[in-house]
Image: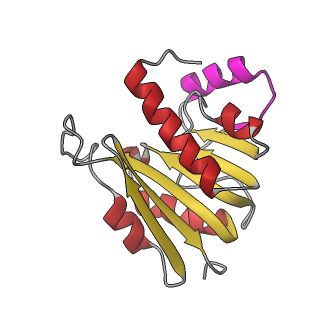
Amino acid sequence: GSRLNAEQMVRFAHRYTAAATLTAGRTLEVACGAAIGLGALQASGRAVVGLDYTPAVLNRAQTHYRGRLPLLCADSQQLPVAAAAFDAVLCLEAIYYFPDPAAFLAEARRVLRPGGWLLVGSSNPDWPYFVPGSLARDCAPEICASFPAGIGVDVCSDALVTLTALRLERAAL
């Protein structure tokens, strides 16, 4: 895996604790990078799959996990998985790097089962070190607006990150 400083460890713990609290069952993490948190989710009894677009960071995850969990190299805007295949989709502090976040959100809806959760972490604009810009912004409003009726929304923030959780109440249209 990758080396993290103390602040990054707090952020990772917060994100994956929230994910473990909200989700159960089969979980897909999109833009998983070195897949630092997937092992913790797997240890808590979840079936997990990691997906990242960048082969170099995914190779670090593959070296660390040595086949203990599935890892896919693919585009977040064209997920290579079946419809309604996951109980949860995670995307933590990565959505603002996607060329077309709306395409990712449509794909997340497609691969979620009814009752499934989408958990998106984005920079908290109230964080003292937050720097507004196209790659560092609060995405919660557009994430919430992108989901059709029938979605329950729960947004929580701490000093570092905004977590937006959306539950797919019925099959996506």
The residue located at (58%, 55%) in the rendering is 78
The boundaries of the magenta stretch are 55-71
Percent across and percent down for residue 115 are 67, 72
Q: With respect to residue 106, does 79 lie above or below?
A: above
Residue 146, image quadrant: bottom left
Q: Could you tell me residue 145's position as x and y percent? A: 38, 73
Query: Is residue 92 shown in magenta?
Result: no
Overall secondary structure of the magenta stretch? helix
Q: Is residue 105 visible?
A: yes
Q: Position of residue 118 (x, y in %)?
A: 56, 60
Identity of the residue furthest to the top in this view: 3
Residue 111 locus on image (x, y percent) = 67, 63
User: Which residue occupies the foreground of this view, 49 or 98?
Assistant: 49
Q: Residue at x 74, y 41 (%)?
A: 44
Q: Is residue 63 left or right of residue 158?
A: right
Q: Quadrant of the N terminus?
A: top right
Say which of 161 and 55 sits in front: 161
Answer whether residue 65 is magenta in the image.
yes
- Seen at 41% across and 62% down, the residue is 155
Q: Nearer the viewer, residue 16 or 116?
A: 16
The answer to which image quadrant residue 34 occupies is: top right
As drawn, 138 above or below 169:
above
- Residue at image location 66% in from the left, 56% down from the top: 23
Give the quadrant of the C terminus: bottom right
Can see residue 75?
no
